[in-house]
Image: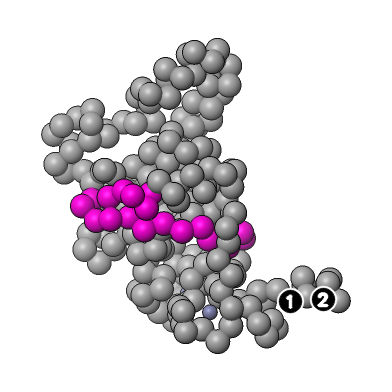
Amino acid sequence: MAHYMASIYGTEGDPIYCTFYHKIGACLHVDSCARKHVHPTYAPVVLLPNFYQPGSHHSQRVLDTLYENLFTELSLQYGEIKRIRICENESEHLAGNVYIQFRRSEDALKAVEALNNRYYDGRPVYAELSPVTNFEEAVCRQHEKGACRRGGNCNFMHLVHPTSALKRDLLRAQDAYLDERQRAPRSHRESRAQSPDRDMSSERGKDTPTAAEATPTMA
Ligand SMILES: [Zn+2]
Ligand SMILES: [Zn+2]
């Protein structure tokens, strides 16, 4: 019985739990869904709903800036990031959703608590823990191949990707930072936490006053 319950949990055959909320962390019916949305209280993935606004400024540079700001800020402040996924769907429940997967659930929890008191680009940030565990199942395969016939209203994630070199550089910088922090004696570790690595915080508003006007920043 337990095995059967576990095997259908969150699938289309599940009569109680919503498959979309469970797999994608967002369901078209939101709170009026006939099936249950179980919001996790401990999970490694943070969702920032409607965070990326593709309609207003859809360019690779803007996307890259957003990705770099989020990655740098969240990795330094809360802990190791495994991946960030950004949606360009048009339907309200998925539009601009940003998913951040931390290596540790406790870091995700810290991030959610802190982010709910923050602003990005002048807008208040809303953050929640998300039940998504398998991004491959949540992503629309047709869209990844180039075209989805459901378009912007598809209920699977339509991702936009930052420049791959940027992604690689940030992951490497994070690895180097974590390595160094692990090797460093405690006193050094504490002082570094207060003055983030230049590489990982490149072009942040605080360092470059002129960039602050053009670049959205966390506040
Ligand atoms: Zn639902
Ligand atoms: Zn699709």
Q: Does dot 2 land on a helix, a strand or a loop?
A: helix
Q: Mark number for residue 4?
A: 2
**Amino acid type, label 2:** Tyr
In the image: residue 146, left or right of residue 198:
right
Residue density around tag 1, few if under 14, some if 14–19, many if 20 or more, within 10 Å: some
Query: Measured from the top left, where is residue 47 in percent x and y?
Result: 46, 58
Which residue position is annotated with label 1? 8
The residue sitting at 48% across, 68% down in the picture is: 157
Q: Quadrant of residue 96?
A: bottom left
Residue 116 percent location from the top left of the image = 37, 53
Q: Is mark 1 within 8 Å of ligand 1?
A: no
- Magenta segment: 115-134
Q: Are marks 2 and 1 in contact (CB under 8 Å)?
A: yes
Quadrant where the C terminus sits is top left
Quadrant in which the N terminus is drawn: bottom right
Residue visible at 84% across and 71% down? 3
Decide: is 106 above or below 123.
above
The answer to whether residue 161 shows anywhere in this view is yes
Kind of residue indicated by mark 1: Ile
| Front position in the image: 146 or 190 | 190
